[in-house]
Amino acid sequence: MSAVPGPADSGTRRLILVLGDQLTPALGALAQIDARHDRVLLAEVMEEASHVPHHPKKIALIFSAMRHFAEALRAQGIQVHYVTLDDPDNSGSLPGELQRWTQRLNPAEVHLTECGDWRLEQSLRHCGVPIHWHQDSRFLCTREAFAAWAKDRKQLRMEFFYREMRRTSGLLLNPDGTPEGGAWNFDADNRKALPKEVRPPTAWRIEPDAITHEVLALVGQRFTEHYGSLEGFDYPVTAEQAERLWQHFLANGLAEFGDYQDAMADDEPFLFHSRISAALNIGLLDLRRVCAEVEAAYRAGDVPLNAAEGFIRQLIGWREYVRGIYWLRMPEYAEGNAFGNSRALPEFYWTGRTRMNCMRQAIGQTLEHAYAHHIQRLMVTGNFALLAGIAPKAICDWYLAVYMDAFDWVELPNTLGMVMHADGGYLGSKPYCASGQYIKRMSNHCQGCSYKVSESTGEAACPFNALYWHFLMRHRERLERNPRMGMVYRNLARMNEARQRALWDWGERLLASLDAGEVL
């Protein structure tokens, strides 16, 4: 599939660079393409595949989807130059490839759609090639529109932004502009644990084709040092496959998604979640159509309002909100560390070898599937990192590496802001910290754990418990005036001094164990 550039070509009108997370024909840079005179460039490069140790399945997904997209463009008569990772002339970076092909093709213009990664966009903007930039129209809210919304606001909150996106899109609104059901947000109805008698739908799967098998072999050879398994790869790599995954969820998962979106269960990695985020983030699905079909399912009586609203809120509320914050605050945002954390990420985040069953479940399925749903990320692996005082960059790099759907614009604000509260409350009003009791309430993980969630100190005690109170005590000065933390600190104040000392001392012992490289 490699394309080796020939002599300089003066007949190219436009050279259009398409990135691995921009695989949609509706891309801004592809608008008004002239198949006779324009050329499209796609390149697999080592820099993007290895600036963090990405999960092998994530690399395979992107490379395979890129190759399939290139074939789809060629089928439309579009001239495509495709550089594979093992091309001997591959420069190893996207700026390098853009420079190489610009020199060879001598285009009148070079076009590119906004990147999803500040690092990459800056390197392309300063690579010496003049570029015509296009807005990424896959999102409802442009970077400029978000900046205008945020201007002069003392505090940014997703809920108010989400309401603006509902008004802008018209989704789930009554004819008079009021929200369907009389409320904007039904999150309070979406926090049920999974009953024993409720079974999630069978996961949708697809067998890899010849192109994907070729990619899997390449990734297996080139990225042996990266954590994660390539076995059982079953992710959609074309728009048609992504559509089949989406329709499977729409018919089998959405109705129960609302009730159980926060639930967790042993050996149930997907439950009632759609698994479309990776396909959506690389351009294989259209946000507007997905949301419209969810609304249509609600209005047809096929799904309840809490499911439809909860799903739409994740897409046009939270997803758009974190992207807006990313581009509003970068690059300074990435340096946030409000709690001054410096602890290294424990090795068991890369191996899954831990006695904590909830962590073992979340990390184990992450290594196997490159996937975990939002509560596993926020309230299990993220919660532990917050309580243990892990350095924000370390946990941010881990999330970016191990999850199929993780791209910098979505991963960084979610992890640094929401998970670690390292931005000091800019993205969210409170840290999402919890003891083991939250995990017990929302899952069956505690039943199969080596630790006892009913105990807070001692060798048998759930580590989340003492670490939770230790976190609250060591950050009391910063957090106790937070109105959303008042009840927690009143509970702490009611504890006698001996109890507080015991929790502090056991928390100190757990943290010392982490520093010594011990596995909890």
Image: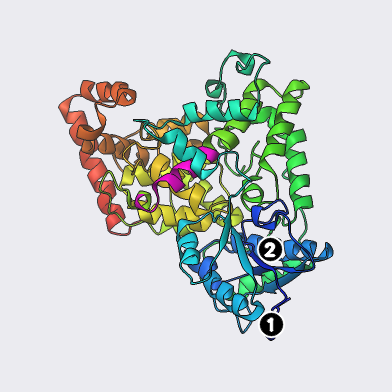
Our reading of the magenta stretch's main secondary structure is helix
Q: Is residue 241 above or below residue 297?
A: below
Q: Residue furthest left?
A: 497
Total of numbered circles in the picture? 2
Residue span colored magenta: 319-332
Residue 18 in which image quadrant: bottom right
| Closer-to-camera residue (406/154) | 154
Which residue position is annotated with label 2? 66
Q: Name which residue lies at 56% across and 25% down.
A: 192
Q: Residue at x 48, y 64 (%)?
A: 125
Q: Earlier in the sequence, mark 2 or mark 1?
A: 1
Q: Is 158 drawn above or below residue 13 in the view shown?
A: above
Q: For the residue carrying disc 2, how many other residues have a C-alpha within 10 Å: few (<14), some (14-19), or many (20+)?
A: many
Q: Where does residue 165 sit, x and y in percent of width and height? A: 57, 30
Front one among 348 and 120:
120
Dot 2 and dot 1 residues touching (CB under 8 Å):
no
